[in-house]
Image: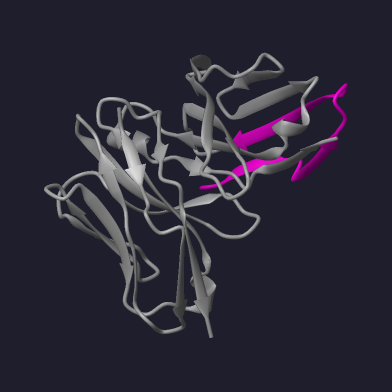
Amino acid sequence: DTEVTQTPKHLVMGMTNKKSLKCEQHMGHRAMYWYKQKAKKPPELMFVYSYEKLSINESVPSRFSPECPNSSLLNLHLHALQPEDSALYLCASSQEGTRASYEQYFGPGTRLTVT
Amino acid sequence: AQSVTQLDSQVPVFEEAPVELRCNYSSSVSVYLFWYVQYPNQGLQLLLKYLSGSTLVESINGFEAEFNKSQTSFHLRKPSVHISDTAEYFCAVTRMDSSYKLIFGSGTRLLVRP
């Protein structure tokens, strides 16, 4: 299984809502990532988890809260978002400890619209 | 710091024509190089990578890229494109000593016309 899955595919939420994005992989990867991608732009790294611990936070606003409950799951909790947070949110994973760790595998993304 | 430049924002070509998508990078340390492809409304797929060894790398669907250290380039080529190759292509680098941060270029939209 070389797949990263993400749910939901689409999400529309108001600025006062609380919602969560979910990501799952069963490749035995121990590094997981959240990216944000605006239209016609490359992905921007938000967070990196390594062995279920947060290792990189790219100065992301606190209205985005990541969580890694176990080695296969990655969540992104959303609260009090702004319209400019509307984007495609991509999850990725990679191995750790070998040269292959440089290859990141991406999920299909969640298209988020904040109204 | 590392940076990646994809000078062409869009490359229109006719079906069965050859294509080259250009990628140049800048880095004070050694890097690994990647090409990712993003089809409409989908995530990114790894197309090919250069980690070491032969400077010419190939993908299973006919794309190839050549790492040129002296010119700091990693251009992507295909001798004959198909309509289905229409997509956004991103060149990316990561430091050899730190695997987490992929630095992406701005992307090139390949538009294949019949």
> What sort of colour scheme is used for the picture?
one colour
- Tell me residue B37's x, y (percent): 47, 56
- Tell me residue A103's x, y (percent): 39, 41
Q: Residue at x 88, y 30 (%)?
A: A14
Q: Compared to A15, does B50 lie above or below?
A: below
Please name the predominant secondary structure of the magenta segment in the image.
strand
Q: Residue at x 37, y 54 (%)?
A: B7
Is B3 positioned to the left or the right of A3 in the image?
left
| Residue B41: quarter of image | bottom right
Is A99 positioned to the left or the right of A39 in the image?
left
Q: Compared to A39, does A79 lie above or below?
A: above
Q: Residue at x 71, y 31 (%)?
A: A85
- Tell me residue A114's x, y (percent): 81, 34
Locate the N terminus of chain B and report the quarter of the image it occupies: top left
Is A82 positioned to the left or the right of B13 in the image?
right
Q: Is residue A23 magenta?
A: yes
How many numbered tags mark residues here? 0
Query: Which range of residues does the magenta coloring cover?
Result: A1-25
Q: Compared to B94, does B9 lie above or below?
A: below
Q: Residue at x 68, y 39 (%)?
A: A87
Is B59 positioned to the left or the right of B11 in the image?
left
